[in-house]
Image (cartoon, helix red, strand yellow):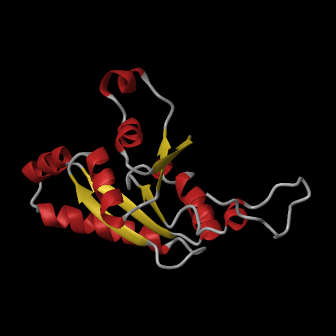
Amino acid sequence: MAQRRYDGPVTPGGIRPPTEAIGESAMYRSILVPVDLDQPSSWQKSLPTAVTLCRHFDAALALVTVVPDWNLMLEAQWSPITFQEFVDVAAARLASLAGSVTDITGVDHHVATGSVYRGVLAVAERIGADLVILSSHRPQMKDYLLGANADRVVRHARCSVFVVRD
């Protein structure tokens, strides 16, 4: 393979910008941020991080929330609200959050149902995400015994995963 010659500017430390140095497209084209709408800590750090990376790489941003099946079943037993209404409410709340992102345009949003980590992975595959940026709390004993959703996304994702700690 032939070496490419870099003739562009060099930073004061002698470091060449990676995308310009090799003449290739941006590292990330599609970034996905999982969001728990009932836990603002799930996106308070990860969303600004994703916006910064989207601006840097000129990447598309998508948000995903997953409505767990067990939650739907419990609520549906005691409420006249139907399954579709739960999904619609989640979609409206997620659209509102997506609309609050002002630094970039065209933030997409998706609502999945079922297992949280499987829903995140399914949406990542469907949209062709290059990177998933998610927040993770400090592990507690229950996380070691049951396994956290963040851990499962990291282990099973086919793309890169960036975990932002609280």
Quadrant the C terminus occupies: top right
Q: In which quarter of the image is the N terminus?
A: bottom right
Figure quadrant of residue 51:
bottom right
In the image, 10 versus 46, the foreground residue is 10
| Viewer-nearest residue: 85 or 117 | 117
Residue shown at 28% from the left, 55% from the top: 122
Residue 1 vs residue 34: left or right? Answer: right
Q: In which quarter of the image is residue 14?
A: bottom right
Q: Which residue lies furthest to the right in this view?
A: 12
Residue at 7% across, 49% down: 77
Residue 120, x across and y down, in percent: 33, 52
Q: What residue is at 30 percent from the left and 63 percent from the top?
A: 126
Relative to 8, is 147 above or below?
Answer: above
Q: On the rendered structure, is 146 left or right of 70? A: right
Q: Nearer the viewer, residue 150 or 87?
A: 150
Residue 146: x and y in percent read 30, 26
Report the number of discs: 0
Residue 104 pos. (x, y %): 57, 75
Does residue 81 appear in the picture of this structure?
A: no
Percent from the top left, x then y, of residue 57? 61, 67
Question: Picture quarter containing residue 65?
Answer: bottom left
Q: Which residue is drawn at 37% across and 68% down?
A: 109
Residue 40 visible from this viewpoint: yes
